Image: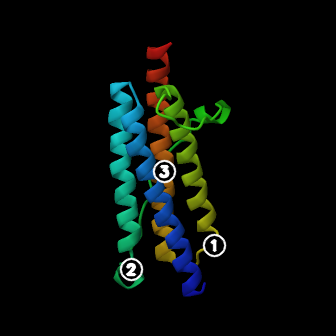
Amino acid sequence: MADKQLTEIMDMAIQFETDANEFYLTASDIAKDPSAKTLLKELATIELKHKEKLEEFNLDDVAHEHHTIPETHDLHVSDYLMDKEITPTSTSQDIMVHAMKREQKAYEFYARMLKVVTSGEVKILFEELAAEELEHKAKIETEYDDVVYKEN
């Protein structure tokens, strides 16, 4: 793969994580449920760490070692839920659905990029990030159950 293509992919990934961080910060201000607020703030911090990890990534500095990616199961809760644009009057339920959908898109982005990149080191990075995005989605799905049952 040409260096230009890899740079473009990394730039897209950085922008993806930047957008996610900004979304979670905004959503945490809107959410009314305290536990949802806490989770959204936690996810904002994690997405910022993803961004930093991508920005600091340098193929020359990567050790050639084997990494084990933890398996995460997708609960598919969001598969049947309608996404809504988040506004200052959005409910915690709306925010959680939107967050689940965002995490699914992030997972799909990294999964698609795994088919494009040729560097083993970049593949490892993207596998880790894909797994983490799916883990975030699972956390949100679990929180969604708690929030929805509290609000309804």
Find the distance from the CA under tag 1 to the CA under tag 2: 18 Å
Find the distance from the CA under tag 3 to the CA under tag 2: 22 Å
Tag 3: amino acid: Glu
Outermost front residue? 88
Q: Which image quarter: residue 100?
A: top right
Q: Which mark is residue 133?
A: 3
| Residue sitting at x 39%, y 71% | 55
Q: Is residue 77 above or below residue 52?
A: above
Q: Are marks 1 and 2 in contact (CB under 8 Å)?
A: no
Task: Provide the secondary structure element on which disc 2 rests.
Answer: loop
Q: Are marks 3 and 2 in contact (CB under 8 Å)?
A: no
Q: Position of residue 51 (x, y in %)?
A: 40, 62
Outermost top residue? 152
Q: Position of residue 88 (x, y in %)?
A: 46, 33
Q: Which mark is residue 116?
A: 1
Crowd rating for badge 2 (residues with CA inside 10 Å; few <14, some 14–19, many 20+): few
Give whichever of 123, 88 is nearer the camera.
Answer: 88
Q: Which mark is residue 58?
A: 2
Task: Provide the secondary structure element on which disc 1 rests.
Answer: loop
Q: Quadrant of the N terminus?
A: bottom right
Q: Which mark is residue 7?
A: none
Which mark is first along the chain, 2 or 3?
A: 2
Task: Provide the secondary structure element on which disc 3 rests.
Answer: helix
Which mark is first along the chain, 1 or 3?
A: 1
Tag 2: amino acid: Asn
Q: Position of residue 32 (x, y in %)?
A: 38, 25
Left or right of residue 82: residue 89 = left
Left or right of residue 86: residue 32 = left
Crowd rating for badge 3 (residues with CA inside 10 Å; few <14, some 14–19, many 20+): many
Q: Position of residue 46 (x, y in %)?
A: 36, 51
Crowd rating for badge 1 (residues with CA inside 10 Å; few <14, some 14–19, many 20+): some
Tag 1: amino acid: Val
